[in-house]
Image (tube, coloured by chain):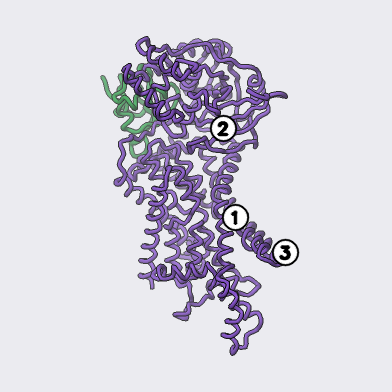
């Protein structure tokens, strides 16, 4: 089922499928978020935004707006 | 490369250990300058590589790739894509985090394509070993055609090998990672020929980010854009494909060079700490606990060295006035310059302690979590999670704080942060607060526990903070922008802070304060001394005669007459005239011309208030200088016959000092950071207007 990172639950793992926003996508690519890589949703900040994800052993913080542009498959 | 002097640039992604390596290579032999034309700090140092080779080391801001996001990062792109620049390095050291090789390699592959002679310093080998990671370094080096040195930048291991390697001739890698597509080869050739560039990839960057390359002139930029348009080259069209292609190469490389990957759970401890520190309730409690500790450190611990500095300079000034011969020049030294320098040095303990705390939080990795925790709340007020560091630094000094806003990539959020940071009560306000609070608030305890004076002081800090965030909130609606705001940031693994790095940060920030703010404070103290010592000649010369005539019937002692002469002189000096000139303006706030002089001089820097008040009264007081507080308490308001410093006047002054923009050095920095007079002038008008209005209301209500 296709969904985006913002819809994932803490502890859930998925594969990055693509980016809905070109500008954000380019930046995420540089950080190593490549389509086909596994992404793990770690936890959210106290008010649910931003969120912390792991991609190839790197912990990243993303705003919900940013996370929702990453579509994933699991 | 001339006379065995070479230029080496350090680069790498944030948190890879760049500053540790820089500090190891250069020691205290470093200085902060500015990159020409832009306001980004240039950290430079010198290092003797071997007997014959001396190197100039430039520490560049952390960056993931040559496509910059922030002002800080732009400079890296600039330097690497302008081979004709005088800053173009002979060699580059790329610091790579061994535990996270993948996204350190992106920049490396770009440097390889630019044909820049590069050495990879593989850092954090200790953590890599702990995580079970095993890298075939020889293989990595031969696959990249780049020398690789293993180092531990925290402990200084491998530095010797790195230096030796850098002293030897180094050629650029012959690999080509990025294959430029056939369809754009013609346009690349045009640009490359026109600018006589060394590589295709450089030409490609000219086309990709024409506007980011500040070294291009208007005509050159227009030329590049025209060529791009003619050949239908659209910037960003190829960027995604380039990144994917590079990561493809990197993945293949790592598949060959990594013998054994790290365990899945080597970050277990770090993740465990995160569960506590970013907890819904606990996370905030811990953050506020940390803030409280920092405050405790600024107020309690800094007091001891500050008292010492204060008394030392007072003694020095007194001794000098006694020992030096008479004359305006020596008076200038003992009463103008020495107290002026004292007024700068006194802030060093607080600034050093606050920046030590901030450096420890940054080094340990906690600051990134604070940004993470605060981002949503800060965004409601038009700020960014990254605004937390500047705002906190504002408690010490707005100048380094405003410089710290450069990590905020969104211009609007950065501007708002710059605009409101001076509301945070800096250490220069504290002496003013302390003396006035002690004067008007009784030293008693509420419920036998809370000290009233302490509570009022805390209230003033809170007031400053509230003014900052509500002004930010208002600006959020006023400023319009189409630029998007991003957070995307790495949360580094928790580590013990490296203490030498904390030490270097303290030195760097203190230097910034001393040289940026200090020289203005010193200059103003000298000007003030002149204004207070001189006036229209006929009036000043008349002082003796007028006072004697006035007081002939009073049978005063010699000393009392001298005091009256001195007071008369001050009243008729240029400073006195200035104070009297603004008296009608500040009377509604409850201030007289003496406070007026102090206010005027505070526009140089706030703490000058205390010195000026001391000067005003000490000139007219007896020789055994009573403390300023006692002197102020006994000051009589001639109109009412009661004390001059009533609670209403004191509160009005406190409120005025909380809000007013009274720091010339801050305005100068804001001008530099916003590239124009527009924002510093708006800031001056807004903050001082708010201060005037609030002080007016407070005084009118209370009296």
Question: Residue B545: x and y, percent?
Answer: 60, 81
Q: Nearer the viewer, residue B500 or B230?
A: B230
Quarter assignment of residue B523 = bottom right
Disc 1 marks which residue? B346
Q: Residue furthest bottom?
A: B553
Question: N-terminal of the two: label 3 or label 1?
Answer: 3
Q: Is residue B32 visible?
A: yes
Q: Is residue B157 visible?
A: no
Q: Residue at x 38, y 40 (%)?
A: B384
Q: Nearer the viewer, residue B385 or B37?
A: B37
- Binning the other alpha carbons within 10 Å of mark 2 as few (below 14), some (14 to 19) or many (20 upward) gives many
Q: Residue at x 52, y 23 (%)?
A: B83
> Are marks 3 and 1 in one subunit?
yes
Disc 2 marks which residue? B19
The chain containing the residue under callout 3 comes to B
Disc 3 marks which residue? B324
Q: Secondary structure at mark 1?
A: loop
């Amino acid at each position: 089922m296709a969904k985006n990172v913002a819809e994932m639950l803490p502890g859930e793992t998925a594969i990055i499928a693509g980016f809905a926003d070109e500008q954000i996508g380019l930046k995420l690519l540089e950080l190593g978020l490549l389509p086909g890589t596994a992404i793990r949703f770690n936890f959210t900040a106290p008010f649910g935004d931003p969120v912390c994800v792991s991609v190839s052993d790197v912990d990243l913080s993303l705003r919900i707006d940013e996370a929702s542009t990453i579509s994933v498959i699991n | 490369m001339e006379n065995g002097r070479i230029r080496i640039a350090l680069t790498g992604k944030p948190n890879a250990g760049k500053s540790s390596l820089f500090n190891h290579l250069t020691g205290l032999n470093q200085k902060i300058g500015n990159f020409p034309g832009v306001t980004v700090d240039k950290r430079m140092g010198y290092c003797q590589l071997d007997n014959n080779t001396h190197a100039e080391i430039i520490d560049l801001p952390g960056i993931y790739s040559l496509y910059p996001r922030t002002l800080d990062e732009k400079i890296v792109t600039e330097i690497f894509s302008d081979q004709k620049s005088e800053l173009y390095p002979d060699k580059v050291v790329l610091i790579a985090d061994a535990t996270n090789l993948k996204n350190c390699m992106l920049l490396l592959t770009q440097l390889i394509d630019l044909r820049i002679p590069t050495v990879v310093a593989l850092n954090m080998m200790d953590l890599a070993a702990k995580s079970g990671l095993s890298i075939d370094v020889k293989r990595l080096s031969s696959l990249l055609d780049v020398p690789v040195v293993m180092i531990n930048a925290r402990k200084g291991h491998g530095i010797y090998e790195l230096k030796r390697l850098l002293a030897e001739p180094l050629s650029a890698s012959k690999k080509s990672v990025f294959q430029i597509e056939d369809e754009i080869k013609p346009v690349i050739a045009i640009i490359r020929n026109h600018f006589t560039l060394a590589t295709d990839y450089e030409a490609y960057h000219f086309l990709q980010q024409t506007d980011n390359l500040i070294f291009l002139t208007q005509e050159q930029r227009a030329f590049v854009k025209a060529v791009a348009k003619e050949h239908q080259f659209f910037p960003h069209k190829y960027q995604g494909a380039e990144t994917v292609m590079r990561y493809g190469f990197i993945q293949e490389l790592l598949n060959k060079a990594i013998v054994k990957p790290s365990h899945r759970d080597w970050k277990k401890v770090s993740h465990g700490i995160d569960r506590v520190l970013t907890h819904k309730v606990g996370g905030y409690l811990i953050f506020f606990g940390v803030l409280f500790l920092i405050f405790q450190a600024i107020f309690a611990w800094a007091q001891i060295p500050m008292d010492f500095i204060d008394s030392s300079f007072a003694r020095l000034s007194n001794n000098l006035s006694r020992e030096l011969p008479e004359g305006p020049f020596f008076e200038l030294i003992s009463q103008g310059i020495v107290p002026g320098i004292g007024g700068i040095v006194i802030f060093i303990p607080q600034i050093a302690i606050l920046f030590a705390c901030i450096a420890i939080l940054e080094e340990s990795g906690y600051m990134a979590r604070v940004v993470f925790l605060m981002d949503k709340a800060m965004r409601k007020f038009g700020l960014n999670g990254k605004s937390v560091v500047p705002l906190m630094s504002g408690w010490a000094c707005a100048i380094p704080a405003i410089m710290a806003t450069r990590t905020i990539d969104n211009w609007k959020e950065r501007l708002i942060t710059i605009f409101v940071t001076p509301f945070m009560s800096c250490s220069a306000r504290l002496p003013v607060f302390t003396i006035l609070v002690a004067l008007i608030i009784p030293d008693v305890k509420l419920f036998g526990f809370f000290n009233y004076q302490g509570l009022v002081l805390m209230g003033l800090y809170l007031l400053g903070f509230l003014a900052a965030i509500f002004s930010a909130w208002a600006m959020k609606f006023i400023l319009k922008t189409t630029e998007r705001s991003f957070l995307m940031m790495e949360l580094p693994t928790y580590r013990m802070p490296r203490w030498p790095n904390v030490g270097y940060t303290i030195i760097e920030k203190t230097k910034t304060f001393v040289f940026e703010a200090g020289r203005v404070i010193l200059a103003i103290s000298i000007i003030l001394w002149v204004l207070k010592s001189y006036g229209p000649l006929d009036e000043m010369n008349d002082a003796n005669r007028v006072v004697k005539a006035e007081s002939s019937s009073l049978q005063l002692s010699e000393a009392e007459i001298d005091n009256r002469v001195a007071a008369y002189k001050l009243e008729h000096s240029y400073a006195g005239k200035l104070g009297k000139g603004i008296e009608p303006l500040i009377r509604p706030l409850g201030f007289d011309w003496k406070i007026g002089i102090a206010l005027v001089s505070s526009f140089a820097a706030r703490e000058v208030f205390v010195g000026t008040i001391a000067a005003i009264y000490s000139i007219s007081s007896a020789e055994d200088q009573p403390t300023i507080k006692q002197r102020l308490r006994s000051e009589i308001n001639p109109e009412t016959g009661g004390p001059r410093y009533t609670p209403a006047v004191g509160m009005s002054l406190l409120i005025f000092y909380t809000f007013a923009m009274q720091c010339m050095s801050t305005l100068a920095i804001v001008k530099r950071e916003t590239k124009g007079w527009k924002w510093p002038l708006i800031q001056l008008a807004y903050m001082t207007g708010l201060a005037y209005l609030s002080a007016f209301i407070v005084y009118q209500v209370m009296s």
